[in-house]
Amino acid sequence: MGFDLRTRLGGASTERYFDRLTRSRQRRVEAKLQKICLDPYDLRESLALAGRADGLRRARVGDRRILFYVKEEVHIVDVTEIGPRGDVYKGR
């Protein structure tokens, strides 16, 4: 059973960033998100963020990163950030 996908609207910058990506990068990000929703703990698709006990995970799409939480009890993948590798980790 897969997970549903949700983006946190408090992170409207995430949606704006996604909208500004080229169409090919958008497709790559969407494909990765679909794989994550099938199995968010698949080590080929995502890893737990080191040093974080709150369950934040990361997935790699080229030089972009997707940060997300998995909410097991409601079967939701909660995407909090999409952006360049160097920027998504700032302030975390």
Image (cartoon, rainbow, N blue to C red):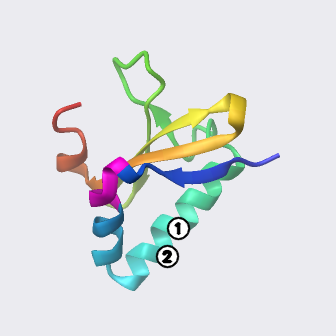
Q: Position of residue 11 (x, y in %)?
A: 32, 51
* Residue lying at the far front of the rendered structure: 10
Image-quadrant location for residue 83: bottom left
Q: Are marks 2 and 1 in contact (CB under 8 Å)?
A: yes
Q: Quadrant of the C terminus?
A: top left
Q: Secondary structure at mark 1?
A: helix
The residue that mark 1 highlights is 30
The residue that mark 2 highlights is 27
* Residue lying at the far bottom of the rendered structure: 23
Q: Is residue 74 above or below residue 85?
A: above
Q: Label 1 amino acid?
A: Glu
Q: Label 2 amino acid?
A: Arg
Q: Is residue 21 above or below residue 72?
A: below
- The part of the chain drawn in magenta is 10-14
In the rendering, which numbered label is found on residue 22?
none
Q: Main secondary structure of the magenta part?
A: helix
